[in-house]
Amino acid sequence: MKAKLGIAAIALSLSASAMSEMYGSASYGLLETEAGTTDFDTPTLNLTFGATLNPNFALEGRLGFGVDDDTKGPFTVEIEDFIGIYAKPMLPISDVVTLYGLLGVAETSIDTNFGDDDDDDISYGLGLSAKLQNNVDLFAEYISLYDDDDIEVNGFNLGASLRF
């Protein structure tokens, strides 16, 4: 499934690149993995490649890697990685600030000492970005990466984008 998502993300980005403004982003994910009744802090580093098709819509491909695990009692949990494709409707609030949503599919790999989980699921989010000078944007967003059975992964991403 990861290969299919990766190929689809590249195809979407390449087809959109001929008619749009491209951007790349890096962010830090302050994510939490809820396994059963226990919450684990599972931070990620994320890379995004996107294409803004018009002022109100973009397409994105995202790739994230876990940077730390968390242990609670006898259990240890870490996000190994994720890959996702998103539609990104945007609402410019001013010349500087834009409110946006995310809706797509992500495949997430979660490593635990009580079993691993590797599956795709609907992913969604809501964010706010601010344009700075020199084609740089800062953003903060809430994202739900995974919600299946007794495992949920969600939290906040903080990052910067470079428009080119």
Image: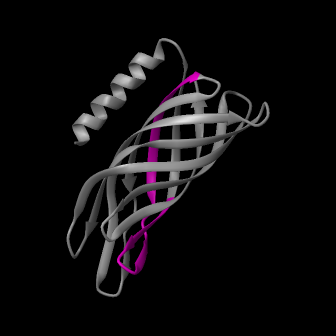
Camera-side residue of 64 and 92: 92
In which quadrant will I find the C terminus?
A: top right
Relative image position of residue 50 (x, y in whole percent): 49, 30
The answer to which image quadrant residue 101 occupies is top right
Tell whether 114 sits left or right of 69. Answer: left
Residue at image coords 39%, 65%: 152
Which residue is nearer to you in this view: 161 or 62? Answer: 62
Horizontal relation, residue 39 to residue 75: left or right: right
Q: Residue at x 30, y 67 (%)?
A: 149
Viewport quadrant of the N terminus: top left
Q: Is residue 30 above or below residue 18?
A: below
Residue at the image point whose x is 79% and y is 34% from the top? 94
Task: Name the residue at the bottom extreme.
Answer: 73
Describe residue 148's horizontal placement relative to residue 28 as left or right. left
Write the start and end of the magenta stretch as one range: 30-53
Queried whether the magenta region covers residue 43, the answer comes back as yes
Residue lying at the far right of the rendered structure: 94
In the rendered image of this protein, does residue 50 appear above or below residue 157? above
Find residue 55 and report its horizontal and vertical position in percent: 65, 25
- The extreme top residue here reads 18
The stretch drawn in magenta includes residue 121: no
Give the percent coordinates (x, y) of residue 129. 67, 41
* Residue 66 against residue 58 in the figure, above or below: below
Question: What is the chief secondary structure element of the magenta stretch?
Answer: strand
Q: Position of residue 100 (x, y in %)?
A: 62, 41
Residue at image point 24% right, 35% down = 4
